[in-house]
Image: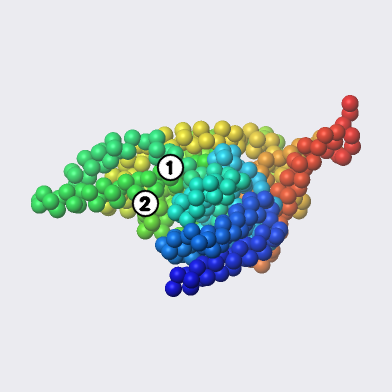
Amino acid sequence: MNDHVRSSAFLKAEQIYEHSARLKILPFPSPNPGLFATFICSVCEKLKARVSSPDAGEKETSLIPIFLVDQIAPTLQFIEGASSENTPASLVVPVERIGEEVLPGSRFMVRRQWRYNYSVQELLRGLKEDLRGLLSEAERNLLFKDLPPRLFAISFPSFERDNAVLHVNFAHEIAHPLEEVYLGRENRPAILLELQREIQKGIKVDDPVQRVVEVGKAVTDARKKREAALMEVLSDTISARVFGPSALFALYEVATLSRSMDRISADFHPPWRFRLREIFSTLVDLRFVDSATFQLKGWPTEIPDCISAVKRVVDDWLLQLHRVVEQTADTTEIEKNLSDKQAYDSARRALPAVREFAAEKVPQQYTPTVFGEEVPGLLARLHADLPPNRIEHGLSENREVRLASILASGWLFKLGELAPVFGKDRDAYVQRVQTLNRLVLKAIQLSEIQTEYAKRPGKQDNGTAKPA
């Protein structure tokens, strides 16, 4: 029986090695998937050697095939989904760069998934723990020496690959690993004590034992919902600081796919209306939205007529959205349940600290000033069916533009110029949105090329030698 287990383990390791080796040579937008594939190959080589060793114990040998099938094999989907063919390739490196700024010491892989959601998953922590019982410390250290301390896979809905403007949601996922850092700063015993005190007032159970049980359940439930609410607001706030108003536009598009705008989900996610209200408030604080008129700020005094038309439609869209978030159906739903009410009362008191933490983690935020300097010119390029990748100041004075401005111009064009087309010609609307996304992805690619070219010594933007 032991020989059968050994042979099975060896075969599984060899099969995974061969598949990972094939994946490793795929074209990837960044080096991170190839780095991870090389790591998987190395793990399989070590485990093949270990299972073949006469020193390997029976228990250890039996754990290796389980580890390979349960833990290693599923990671191949992250590598395969991260290939250039499966991702919005031009957007990958800029997104990974944002992740490395928000989470220093971390690396990222952007990959497709078939579930319709955006998500983030750490890839190394669990593997490190599981390998602890299978390989020596020296062998483990050798395996992980070329990897970053943390490696994350950011997943997006597969059929949205080319929906460039929706990928603003990547910033939200990048922020999720900060949850444990923020929660580690809170005074959890004091928070739990406060929740317990308030919940005890509302529990109407006479039996003392049953009362303790009910209070305990309610406190646990309230804690989970409170933390989930704060973590979503934290990620939304960081997304808003990175991408400005585009974060609101992208969040709303995903929210419209929800079955309810006003209920806490089964996995404790807060109501969409609550999140939209908070990100709207954040954009007011960041001076992207006027607190009195609820219109977009940052525009220069003079803009072309075509841009003015976009601005009017977007301002009306924002006013309508403000009316949506002004409604309190989510609050009414929350207050029906004792633990929900206490969870959100506690969460609201913590929101200032969450926003302060977000500001600390994104020191180089996108600003209305940069928006005003860059976006109108990019919108004008989109209006002319050109990629929104540069501000025209003459042949030798073209400025690099921020990724946030490229995506903002895409969103404003979609909402302000293309949305009205839907009511006139729906097929034309679909085609124009597809063209918009191609132009935005091409703009990101060209902007990256321009950035890299500008780093070359002795060159200026028009390709001629810089003056001495």
In the rendered image, residue 341, in percent from the top left (x then y), is placed at 29, 47
- SS state under label 1: helix
> Residue 97 lies in what quarter of the image?
top right
What is the crowding at mark 2: few (fewer than 14 residues within 10 Å), some, or many (at least 20)?
Answer: some
Q: Residues within 10 Å of mark 1 (few under 14, many from 20)?
A: few
Whether residue 435 is situated above or below residue 4 in the rendered picture? above
Relative to the observer, which residue lies in front, 47 or 128? 47
Quadrant in the picture for the N terminus:
bottom left
Residue drawn at (59%, 41%) of the image = 100
- Quarter of the picture holding the C terminus: top right
Q: Nearer the viewer, residue 95 or 374?
A: 95
Query: Is 428 positioned to the left or the right of 327 in the image?
Result: right
Q: Residue at the far left: name it.
A: 207
| Residue nearest the observer in this picture, 203 or 413 | 203
What residue is at 53 percent from the left and 55 percent from the top? Answer: 118
Q: Along the polypeptide, which appears first: circle 1 or circle 2?
A: 1
Q: Which mark is residue 330?
A: 2
Q: Position of residue 440 (x, y in %)?
A: 69, 52
- Amino acid carrying mark 2 in the image: Asp
Mark 2: which secondary structure?
helix
Q: What residue is rendered at 73% in x and 50% in y?
A: 445
| Residue annotated with mark 1 | 180
Query: How far separated are the C-alphas under marks 1 and 2?
Result: 27 Å
Residue 183 visible within the image? yes
